[in-house]
Image (tube, rainbow, N blue to C red):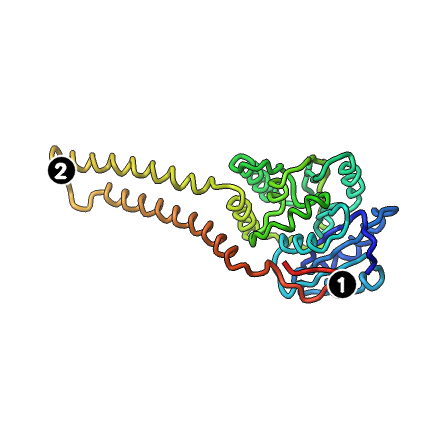
């Protein structure tokens, strides 16, 4: 491997993208004309021919690096592995399905060289996605912006460019449940946006099901906000107040009214209190589960093979 430091390291997670890799790589090479760069493909446990295609690309071009995970560890861990292996002054994160146009990278670099350590690509439009996905994503980003103390920009994904000083700090953050766009916002430095129109996938189907999106949303909320815990606490106070009023009502009925065995308020209060308790326990469980994962100190991912000077995280 050449020891010459490239200007750009481009990190691309790959999971079952055999139909997109070659076309995306061709676009990427064309877009990077005149720039010193390396591209790091992270194979996140693909079950198709993705790894074979990455090996071919790396053999044909020494600027192409690959990291092959032992299994699927997830999109955020793949980005983290690429960040660990990056050598460039700037690192670009982008998806491997063609929705993040590589033609935008020179503009991101130009903006970064104006004095910004982070330039994130902010979506104006999102082609090829259902109205439900667009709506839920829009509402989630706005909710997250309101409930966190960190200013996480709305309508942004992981497509961005970061300076090596940001990358070095990012590599020191050992969370098991990664939410990189939140972590980068937390790090700070000078950050700005570059608007773009997100394209459709070149081929295949999205790997982000609604279930995975929900888990990703929980990682973002629990990693950068204690708002759910505050909601649980506030709900406890509200329920306690309602329960106190029911006690007063019960005493009044006993001494001044009439009571019937099994009356409705008993059932309402039991169900209401039980529901709030289960909600609170569930929220606490989410946070404790993440603490448990971090305390175990297991590696976030395991590399089976690589042609980078890479150390496991």
**Residue drawn at point x = 85 percent, y = 62 percent:** 60
* Picture disc at residue 239: none
Is residue 115 at all visible to an observer of this figure? yes
Which residue is under mark 2?
A: 254
- Label 1 secondary element: loop
Looking at this view, name the residue that lies furthest to the right. Answer: 34
Image spot of residue 107 (x, y percent)? 79, 39
Question: Marks 2 and 1, Cα distance to the nearest angstrom?
Answer: 79 Å
Image spot of residue 93 (x, y percent)? 71, 48
Image spot of residue 63 (x, y percent)? 82, 56
Looking at the rendered structure, the number of numbered marks drawn on it comes to: 2
The part of the image, by quadrant, that contains residue 62 is bottom right
Q: Is residue 310 left or right of residue 245?
A: right
Q: Quadrant of the N terminus?
A: bottom right
Q: Is residue 312 above or below residue 225?
A: below
Q: Is residue 250 left or right of residue 280?
A: left
Q: Quadrant of the C terminus?
A: bottom right
Q: Is residue 194 left or right of residue 184?
A: right
**Residue drawn at point x = 80 percent, y = 58 percent:** 64
Of residue 57 and residue 84, the one placed in the foreground of this image is 84
The part of the image, by quadrant, that contains residue 90 is top right
The part of the image, by quadrant, that contains residue 188 is top right
Which residue is under mark 1?
A: 307
**Residue drawn at point x = 80 percent, y = 42 percent:** 106
Of residue 187 and residue 185, the one placed in the foreground of this image is 187
Is residue 161 at all visible to an observer of this figure? no
């Amino acid at each position: 491997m050449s020891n010459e430091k490239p200007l750009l390291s481009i990190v691309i997670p790959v999971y079952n993208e055999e139909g997109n890799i070659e076309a995306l790589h061709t676009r990427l090479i064309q877009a990077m004309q005149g720039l010193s760069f390396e591209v790091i493909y992270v194979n996140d446990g693909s079950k198709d021919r993705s790894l074979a295609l990455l090996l071919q690309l790396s053999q044909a071009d020494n600027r192409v690096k690959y990291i092959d995970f032992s299994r699927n560890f997830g999109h955020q861990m793949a980005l983290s592995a690429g960040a660990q292996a990056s050598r460039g002054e700037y690192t670009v994160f982008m998806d491997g399905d063609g929705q993040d146009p590589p033609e935008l990278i020179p503009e991101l670099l130009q903006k970064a060289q104006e004095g910004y350590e982070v330039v994130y690509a902010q979506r104006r439009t999102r082609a090829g996605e259902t109205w439900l996905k667009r709506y839920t994503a829009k509402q989630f980003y706005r909710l997250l912006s309101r409930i966190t103390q960190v200013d996480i920009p709305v309508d942004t994904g992981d497509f961005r460019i970061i300076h090596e000083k940001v990358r070095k700090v990012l590599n020191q953050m050992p969370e098991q449940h990664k939410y990189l766009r939140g972590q980068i916002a937390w790090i700070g430095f000078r950050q700005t946006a570059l608007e773009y129109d997100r394209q459709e996938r070149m081929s295949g189907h999205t790997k982000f099901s609604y279930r995975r999106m929900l888990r990703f949303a929980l990682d973002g909320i629990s990693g950068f906000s204690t708002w759910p815990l505050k909601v649980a606490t506030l709900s406890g106070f509200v329920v306690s107040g309602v329960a106190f009023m029911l006690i007063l009502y019960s005493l009044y009925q006993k001494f001044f009214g009439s009571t019937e065995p099994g009356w409705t308020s008993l059932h309402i209060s039991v169900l209401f209190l039980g529901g709030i308790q289960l909600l609170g326990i569930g929220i606490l469980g989410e946070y404790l589960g993440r603490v448990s994962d971090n305390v175990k100190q297991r590696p976030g991912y395991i590399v089976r093979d690589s042609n980078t000077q890479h150390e496991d995280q």
